[in-house]
Image (cartoon, rainbow, N blue to C red):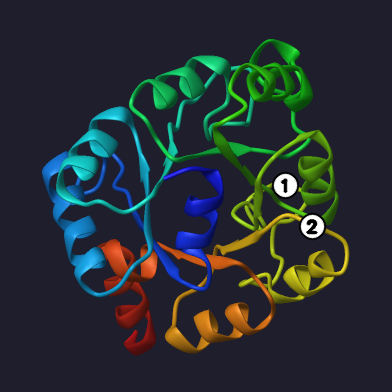
Amino acid sequence: MNKNQIIEAIKGGLIISCQALETEPLYSSFIMSRMAVAAMQEGAVGIRANTVVDIEAIKQAVSLPMIGIIKKVYDDSEVYITPTEVEVEALIEIGVEIIAIDATNRLRTGGRTLEEIFIPLKAKYPNQLFMADCSCYDDCVNAEKIGFDFVGTTLVGYTKATKGQKLPATDLIVELKKTLNIPIIAEGGIHYPKQLKEVMDSGCHCAVVGGAITRPQEIARRFINEIK
């Protein structure tokens, strides 16, 4: 599919995030690939996944568009979602349809800005779709300005400046619809079907749900906390 076909293919649908950290029981590329199969069978329009090995396993199992990330921690930066060219190049190498990058204004490793890293990458790979994982209105506006193809509300509430903000970020999506010309992807804090309906009605292009579907520890914790 070309860029426009991918954008159209995910419109109005649900993307399922299939991720597990090394400390979690489901940490396995095979398990993540089966999660993706289940998501596809129930009508998901795409998959979001982390690491080259997980993405390759998922791509062998399903034919849906992929939002790919590589979480990498650098000692001198708070940014960990696809933070440098190294991670982007690795994702391009395996043919990820959409690459998501932290698009906050926080400095990357080596004291570099988002613009210093992203603008050359966009010029080098004009046919690659890029998603900006944002934390606030200004992040989203800047992301469109420098050439991202999508903005996502992924990091709302996950940065020091936005900690404690209400999720899902429905109000932010409504405001962004008045300003932006690129698609908005709702992500973060969508725990229940009713919330998914609310963010879709707010005008987003599509939505990503992860923990509420594919992280059983998180799901179990919410239930158990209700009866403690």
The answer to which of 221 and 212 lies nearer the viewer is 212
Q: Tell me the quadrant of the picture where the N terminus can be found.
A: top left
Question: Are dots 1 and 2 in contact, CB under 8 Å?
Answer: no
Looking at the picture, does residue 73 appear above or below residue 161? above
Label 1 or label 2, whichever comes before in sequence order: 1
What numbered label is drawn on residue 7?
none
- Decide which of 6, 201 is in the foreground and name it: 6
Residue 192 to residue 175: above or below: below
Residue 220 image offset from top left, x and y in percent: 27, 73
Left or right, 132 with reference to 143: left
Which quadrant is home to the C terminus? Answer: bottom left
Relative vertical location of residue 116 with respect to residue 24 in this rendering, above or below: above
The structure residue drawn at horizontal position 87% and vertical position 69%, both measured from the top left corner, is 178
Q: CA distance from mark 1 to mark 2?
A: 28 Å
Tell us which disc is closer to us: 1 or 2: 2
The reply to whether residue 132 is visible in this rendering is yes
The one of 30 and 215 positioned closer to us in this rendering: 30
Type of amino acid under label 2: Asn
Q: Is residue 25 visible?
A: no
Disc 1 packing (10 Å; few <14; some 14–19; many ≥20): few
**Residue type, label 1:** Lys
The residue at the far top in this view is 110
Residue 209, horizontal then vertical, whole percent: 43, 66
Q: Which residue is mark 1?
A: 160
Q: Residue at x 70, y 16 (%)?
A: 120
The image position of residue 128, as x and y in percent, is 54, 32
190 vs 153, left or right, is: left
Give the quarter of the image for residue 100.
Answer: top right
Residue, x 53% and y 85% (percent of image)?
197
Q: Secondary structure at mark 2?
A: loop
Q: Which residue is mark 2?
A: 181
Question: Label 2 neighbourhood size at 10 Å, few (<14), some (14-19), many (20+)?
Answer: few
